[in-house]
């Protein structure tokens, strides 16, 4: 299940950077986070997942990365408000796009923005926390995924 | 023509406005949730609405229904990150004129509007 979920989110992330920034995103090797991962890079957002899965999706990026990305969206004067909005929108877009493979039962909340606060991420009960590094130009960011499949939900499609 | 942009993300509202202002729309207003969209539609009477789905207070699909109940000829383009087919089908069933998947580009939103306005 974990490998399939990581592939789904990898596809969503690459699609985002392809559309918005003309590509250039490179994914690092995913790794298991600790029980309480301190992974914040400056601006972070979290989306709650319910339905066929339960847990959270986080996206965290540095101010420098967001300032470099905002002009690609037409924002010529990046500031902290726009940085916070952008991490929320990225989290929303990659989570919503994941429904292409995970279906409408993968229900997402509106993003909650953790602006310029230390990010301490806790794994969902009975689920590991995976950290997926996302590099774009010289800037690092991370997607953090902690999901458990609900017992009554259908099985994950076979990984291809 | 008048355009109402509905999205809870400031980044998206501004991006869509930049994509479409000076194009065919002379007057543009925004709303940040479905409830505000229903109210603003009644005041503004736009020719076209772009509508997100996942928003606080009232989601976009409910707002589409409410707007169309009072204005059956309203032209509403859903602009959402929800990529499953059933959501797009549900949006069209509820009366949306089209569905555009985020992330958007200038070309994709202009093409989507061309399609729904040519129908």
Image: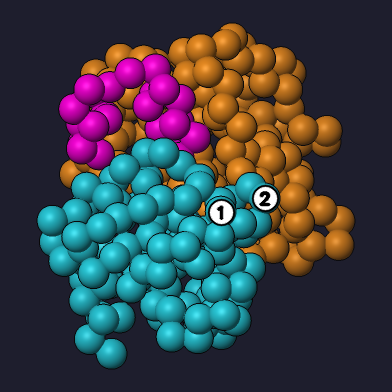
Magenta extent: A68-90
Is B107 situated left or right of B37 in this image?
left
Q: Is label 1 in a helix, a strand or a loop? A: helix
Is A153 situated left or right of A104 in this image?
right
Whether marks 2 and 1 lie on the same chain = yes
The relative height of residue A47 versus residue B66 in the rendered view (above or below) is above
Quadrant housing the N terminus of chain B: bottom left
Asked if residue A53 is among those painted magenta in the image, a careful observer would answer no
- Which chain appears cyan? B
Q: Are marks 2 and 1 in contact (CB under 8 Å)?
A: yes
> Residue lying farthest bottom?
B119
What residue is shown at x 68% (from left), y 41% (from top)? A48
Asked if residue A89 is among those painted magenta in the image, a careful observer would answer yes
Tell me residue A143's x, y (percent). 50, 31
- Tag 2 residue: B57
Tell me residue A145's x, y (percent). 61, 35
Tell me residue A147's x, y (percent). 70, 41
- Tag 1 residue: B36
What residue is shown at x 66% (from left), y 29% (from top)? A129
Query: In the rendering, what colour is chain A?
Result: orange
Q: Earlier in the sequence, mark 2 or mark 1?
A: 1
């Amino acid at each position: 299940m974990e490998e399939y979920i990581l592939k789904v989110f990898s596809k969503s992330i690459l699609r985002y950077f392809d559309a918005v920034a003309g590509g250039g995103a490179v994914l690092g090797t995913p790794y298991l986070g600790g029980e309480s991962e301190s992974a914040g890079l400056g601006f972070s957002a979290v989306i709650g997942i319910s339905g066929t899965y339960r847990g959270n999706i986080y996206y965290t990026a540095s101010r420098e990365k967001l300032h470099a990305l905002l002009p690609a969206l037409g924002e010529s004067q990046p500031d902290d408000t726009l940085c916070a909005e952008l991490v929320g929108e990225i989290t929303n877009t990659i989570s919503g796009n994941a429904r292409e493979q995970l279906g409408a039962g993968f229900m997402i909340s509106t993003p909650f923005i953790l602006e310029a606060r230390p990010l301490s991420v806790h794994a969902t009960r009975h689920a590991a926390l995976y950290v997926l590094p996302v590099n774009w130009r010289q800037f690092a960011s991370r997607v953090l995924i902690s999901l458990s499949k609900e017992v009554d939900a259908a099985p994950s499609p076979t990984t291809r | 023509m008048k355009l109402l942009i509905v999205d809870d993300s400031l980044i998206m509202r501004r991006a869509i406005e930049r994509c479409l202002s000076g194009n065919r729309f002379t007057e543009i207003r925004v709303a940040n949730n479905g409830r505000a969209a229903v109210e603003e539609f009644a005041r503004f009477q736009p020719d076209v609405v772009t509508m997100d789905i996942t928003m606080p207070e009232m989601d976009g699909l409910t707002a589409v229904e409410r707007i169309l109940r009072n204005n059956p000829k309203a032209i509403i383009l859903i602009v959402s990150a929800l990529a499953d087919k059933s959501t797009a089908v549900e949006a069209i069933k509820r009366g949306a004129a089209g569905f555009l998947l985020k992330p958007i580009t200038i070309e994709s939103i202009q093409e989507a509007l061309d399609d729904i306005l040519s129908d």
